Structure formats: structure tokens, C-alpha cells
Image: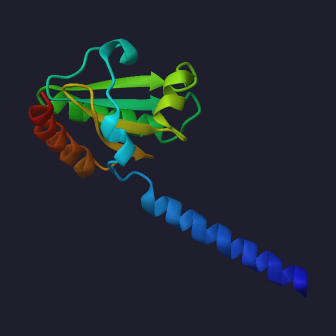
């Protein structure tokens, strides 16, 4: 009987963890420590956008990376001054560690100076990305 109770408790806790992780996944947020992070074109291997840069960290076996790429490429194609840069997380481990990236896809939204103004783990929502681009436009004018 004790084994059944322990099994039920483990299943309940695992389910609660899964629901919480799913609810948080894909939401763009600004972490306090990200405010001090600034990425250069040399670190990214590409030029920064005039308005914002959408940096996607992906891996070869990441399921949500493909739809995330499609979304970000579409947004970068429709928003003037926005660029999309995709980075293979397995090839750039030093950058992944420095930025505290724990899963893919992780998307960073940078202002025109390369400062992180938003971050998401998991597939982002279009509205959140657009809001972060607006934030990037506002913050780049204040920090330059």
C-alpha cells in the first residue's frame, strides 16, 4: 500500500511540474541579469539589426526549433530593421554557458546596440516577440 501512495505522489508531482513548465515555456521575459548582457556582431557571427535582432539558439534534434525559426524569419522579414540570427548551441558552448541557456529553442531579443531586452525558452508567441521588438526600439534610444 505504501508503494502505491509513493507512486501516486510521484506522478502527481511530475504532472504539476510538467504543467508549470508548459505554462512558462515560450513566454518572453526580461531577467535582471540579462540587462547587463550585450552581444557584439563578432560574437553572433552576423550583423545586428537596425531595430532589433532575434537570436535563436537551436540544436539539430530540437523539435520546436523549426517552427520557431519559421516564425522568427517571418517576423524579421516583415518588421523593418529586424534581423534573425540562428546559432547552433552545440557549436557555441562557451556562449551558451555565458548566457545561461538551458534548453532549445531559446530566443534572445536584442536592441540595436546588442543588449538583451527579452528572452524565452521554448517556442515564442508572435505577440510577445512583437512586444519585445517594441521594447528593443525604446531601449536602444535610451542607451545610446
Horizontal side, residue 112 vs residue 124: left or right? left
Q: Quadrant of residue 112?
A: top left
Which is nearer the eye, 40 or 51?
A: 40
Looking at the image, which residue is at 27% across and 31% down? 115
On screen, residue 66 above or below 20 = above
Percent coordinates x, y for residue 85 in the rendering: 34, 23
Nearer to us in this view, 7 or 77:
7
- Which of the image's four quarters has the N terminus? bottom right
Q: Position of residue 123 (x, y in %)?
A: 41, 46
Image quarter of residue 8: bottom right
Q: Quadrant of the C terminus?
A: top left
Q: Residue furthest bottom?
A: 1
Tag count: 0
At x 37% / y 18%, what residue is drawn? 44
Residue at horizontal 89 percent and vertical 79 percent from the top:
3
Q: How is the image coloured?
A: rainbow
Q: Position of residue 127 (x, y in %)?
A: 23, 51
Is 13 situated above or below 121?
below
Q: Position of residue 78 (x, y in %)?
A: 15, 32
Left or right, 103 with respect to 140, comes to right
User: On the rendered structure, is 80 left or right of 29?
Assistant: left
Amino acid at each position: 500500500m505504501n508503494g502505491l501512495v509513493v507512486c501516486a505522489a510521484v506522478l502527481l508531482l511530475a504532472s504539476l511540474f510538467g504543467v508549470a513548465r508548459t505554462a512558462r515555456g515560450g513566454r518572453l521575459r526580461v531577467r535582471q541579469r540579462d540587462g547587463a548582457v550585450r552581444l557584439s556582431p563578432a560574437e553572433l557571427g552576423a550583423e545586428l539589426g537596425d531595430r532589433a535582432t532575434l537570436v535563436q539558439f537551436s540544436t539539430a534534434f530540437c523539435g520546436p526549433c523549426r517552427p520557431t525559426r519559421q516564425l522568427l524569419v517571418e517576423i524579421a522579414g516583415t518588421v523593418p530593421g529586424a534581423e534573425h540570427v540562428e546559432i547552433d548551441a552545440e557549436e557555441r558552448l562557451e556562449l551558451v554557458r555565458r548566457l545561461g541557456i538551458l534548453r532549445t529553442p531559446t530566443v534572445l531579443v536584442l536592441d540595436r546596440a546588442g543588449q538583451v531586452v527579452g528572452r524565452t525558452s521554448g517556442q515564442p508567441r508572435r505577440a510577445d516577440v512583437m512586444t519585445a521588438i517594441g521594447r528593443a526600439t525604446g531601449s536602444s534610444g535610451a542607451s545610446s
